[in-house]
Image (cartoon, rainbow, N blue to C red):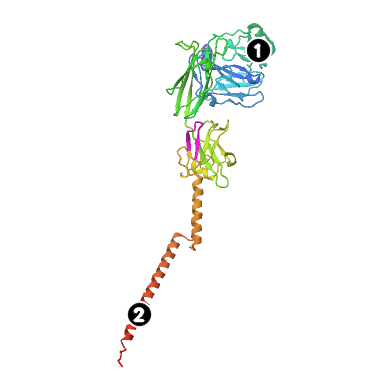
């Protein structure tokens, strides 16, 4: 009996150890209201960085029967959370947010869980009347306050602390679900207001997308905060784009700027912030990995003479902003307006009433990027290939597709040839039929000429014979 008891205790201890090892990334803090300040904060408890690629967050309402996507794995691609550091997901930019999700939806009495790339639950967090955490939850936070986890499994209700350690509270998680939220909110604020247990430090963050298109500018910006969370505008930045190019900028002149990656691949972009312009060692450092892909944006189809439309297809796995891109025809150009977004593997159709193009523009149609660099040329002499969308004929990046223009041109040539045949009274039969009638006509002509020459030769012979029967007499 003692052996069995000891074995159970050992298994329980090992379970707790495994749970502690697994719980590297936790849901640390959540703020619901006001909506524009809503955020979810993750914390890495480990001593090593954690790659978040493949991670995703789900949400379940109190009355819901299943979990729904809250933050998809697309947003975590090439993202990481540093050791003993925070990762911020917010509705708007807050203190250098790592992910900005404008439709971030969290309501009262929700269960939020984060899963890794294997679909395993890494951590789960319940508040309000949610019952998915085995009866352990915290009350719904009121407006202007956040709710999170403090030390020793304690619930925290106080002013929000994005990217900083939560306020200390004396309200346990177990009691939080049955307590009046306003009571311990007031208790927390009165006891530990403005008391943040964290080592203050200067932080800098790169603000950019984690993917770009080769040859197309990508925007960069940064945000640096001081020991009290204030934004710093003095000092200097040093950017390294990972492709051999770098840039040094005065902090007081910092603004959005663009960079172009010429070739596809993955590039590590790093940013160093120096509080003192003449310092040799940076006061803060940040880096991200940017995946660069080819801009496979193609002219997939065009219309006919009666309705000359132009179809544009995005053959990449990323959405692209076509703002500033140009369609160039024979005599006209069309510039895509601001915020023209083309989703992955989707198409848009441009009417001639919008572009002003006509059928003749299809002979020399080009797609140019915002720097007027040609990224696709539509040629009427291309071979037929089936499109990945609805078996339509489109033009791939290798220009192996046959355009509709060629078909229309061939139709016109055929019509002209048929009209010529009809006007010349040649029967509209096969090619063999035409050869037959030609040979027959030639045969009849040869026969007629042969008869004619035979008759002429016969008359000469007869005259010669007749003339021999007469004699000329002298009288």
Position of residue 188 relative to residue 466, above or below, is above
Estimate how packed mark 2 is, as few (under 14), some (14 to 19) or many (20 or more) residues with alpha carbons within 10 Å: few
**Residue 338 occupies which quadrant of the picture?**
top right
User: Residue at horizontal 34%, vertical 80%?
Assistant: 460
Secondary structure at badge 1 equals: helix
| Left or right of 450 in this view: 124 | right
Residue 24 seen by the camera: no
| Left or right of 254 in this view: 447 | left
Q: Which mark is residue 471?
A: none
At which x and y percent is residue 102? 60, 24
At which x and y percent is residue 448? 40, 73
2 or 1: tag closer to the N-terminus = 1
CA gap, disc 2 and disc 1: 136 Å
Count the marks.
Answer: 2
**Residue 31 occupies which quadrant of the picture?**
top right
User: Residue at horizontal 55%, vertical 47%?
Assistant: 305
Outermost residue, top direction?
191
At which x and y percent is residue 444? 41, 70
> Mark 2 or mark 1, which is nearer to you?
2
**Which residue corresponds to mark 2?**
458
Residue range of the region highlighted in magenta in the rendering: 365-376
**Which residue corresponds to mark 1?**
175
């Amino acid at each position: 009996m003692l052996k069995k008891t000891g074995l159970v205790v050992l298994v329980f201890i090992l379970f707790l150890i495994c749970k502690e090892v697994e719980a590297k990334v936790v849901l640390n803090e959540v703020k619901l209201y006001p909506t524009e300040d809503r955020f979810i904060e993750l914390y890495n408890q480990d001593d090593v960085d954690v790659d978040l690629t493949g991670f995703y967050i789900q949400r379940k309402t109190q009355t819901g029967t299943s979990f729904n996507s809250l933050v998809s794995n697309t947003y975590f691609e090439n993202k990481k959370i540093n050791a003993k550091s925070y990762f911020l997901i917010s509705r708007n930019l807050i203190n250098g947010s790592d992910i900005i999700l404008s439709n971030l939806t969290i309501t009262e009495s929700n269960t939020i869980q984060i899963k890794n790339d294997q679909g395993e639950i890494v951590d789960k967090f319940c508040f309000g009347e949610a019952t998915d955490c085995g009866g352990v939850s915290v009350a719904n936070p009121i407006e202007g306050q956040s709710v999170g986890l403090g030390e020793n499994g304690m619930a925290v209700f106080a002013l929000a602390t994005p990217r900083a350690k939560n306020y200390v509270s004396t309200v346990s998680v177990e009691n939080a679900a049955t307590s009046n939220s306003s009571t311990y909110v007031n208790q927390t604020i009165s006891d530990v207001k403005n008391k943040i247990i964290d080592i203050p430090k200067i932080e800098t963050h790169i603000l950019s997308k984690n993917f770009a298109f080769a040859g197309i500018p990508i925007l960069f910006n940064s945000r640096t905060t001081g020991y009290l969370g204030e934004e710093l505008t003095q000092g200097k930045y040093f950017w390294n784009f990972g492709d051999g190019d770098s840039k040094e900028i005065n902090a007081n002149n910092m603004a959005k700027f663009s960079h172009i990656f010429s070739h596809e691949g993955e590039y590590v972009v790093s940013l160093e912030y120096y509080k003192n312009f003449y310092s040799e060692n940076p006061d803060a450092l940040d880096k991200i990995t940017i995946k660069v892909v080819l801009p496979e944006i193609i002219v997939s189809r065009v219309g006919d003479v009666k309705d000359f439309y132009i179809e544009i297809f995005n053959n990449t796995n990323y959405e692209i902003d076509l703002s500033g891109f140009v369609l160039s025809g024979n005599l006209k150009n069309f510039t895509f307006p601001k915020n023209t977004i083309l989703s992955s593997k989707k198409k848009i159709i441009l009417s001639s009433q919008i572009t002003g193009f006509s059928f003749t523009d299809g002979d020399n149609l080009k797609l140019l990027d915002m720097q007027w660099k040609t990224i696709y040329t539509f040629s009427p002499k291309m071979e037929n290939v089936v499109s990945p969308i609805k078996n339509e004929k489109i033009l791939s990046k290798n220009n192996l597709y046959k355009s509709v223009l060629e078909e229309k041109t061939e139709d016109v040539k055929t019509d002209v040839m048929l009209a010529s045949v009809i006007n010349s009274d040649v029967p509209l039969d096969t090619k063999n039929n035409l050869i037959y009638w030609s040979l027959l006509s030639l045969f009849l002509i040869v026969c007629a000429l042969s008869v004619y020459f035979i008759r002429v030769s016969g008359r000469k012979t007869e005259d010669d014979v007749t003339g021999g029967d007469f004699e000329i007499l002298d009288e």
